Image (cartoon, rainbow, N blue to C red):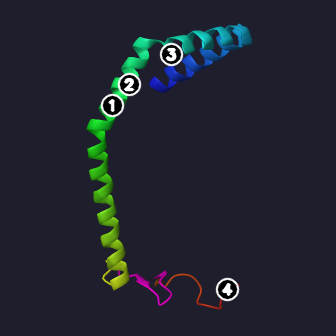
Amino acid sequence: MSKLSFLLGAAVGYVLGARAGQERYDQIKTQANKIWSSDPVQTKVSQATDAAKTKAAPFVADMVSDAAKSTAAKLRDIRSGEEDLPETLHRGTDGRLHAEHDWGPAPGKLP
């Protein structure tokens, strides 16, 4: 139902926008720019930006740090050969993964 409502709203907006033309679009754009540039709005934007920097930054930094540590550990496992791979996969001397399989034609037996 929500997708249908969205599509209906988009269609109505498109039709009304197409009828209004460029002149009305420019009027709406000018008014939106005035509102965005107003002091009360910019004050709230500044407050939100400051809050995001002080509250979200440490959280994001911790997540990035944890992801980097996890990735580094996986790479060390791959380098040391302690990689946890399924039995059907192995890492060749070229460092690439190779799959063992017994399906399909034998090598050199393609039609």
Q: Measure the C-alpha gap from mark 1 to mark 3.
A: 18 Å
Tag 4, which secondary structure? loop
Q: Quarter-wise, where is residue 30 in the image?
A: top right
Q: Is residue 96 magenta?
A: yes
Give, as a three-letter code, the residue at label 4. Leu
Question: Residue placed at 72% from the left, 8% from the top?
Answer: 23
Question: Residue placed at 43% from the left, 13% from the top?
Answer: 39
Q: Which residue is mark 2?
A: 46
Marking on residue 110: 4
**Residue 14 spot, x, y in % from top left:** 65, 17
Describe residue 93's horizontal placement relative to residue 52 as left or right.
right
Q: Which residue is mark 3?
A: 37
Tag 2, which secondary structure? helix
Q: Is residue 10 magenta?
A: no
Which is more foreground, mark 2 or mark 4? 2
Q: Residues within 10 Å of mark 2 (few under 14, many from 20)?
A: few
CB of mark 1 within 8 Å of CB of mark 2? yes
Q: Is residue 99 visible?
A: yes
Q: Is residue 85 visible?
A: no
**Residue 80 spot, x, y in % from top left:** 33, 84
Sooner in the amino-acid sequence: mark 4 or mark 3: 3
Q: Residues within 10 Å of mark 4 (few under 14, many from 20)?
A: few
Give, as a three-letter code, the residue at label 1. Asp
Give, as a three-letter code, the residue at label 2. Ser
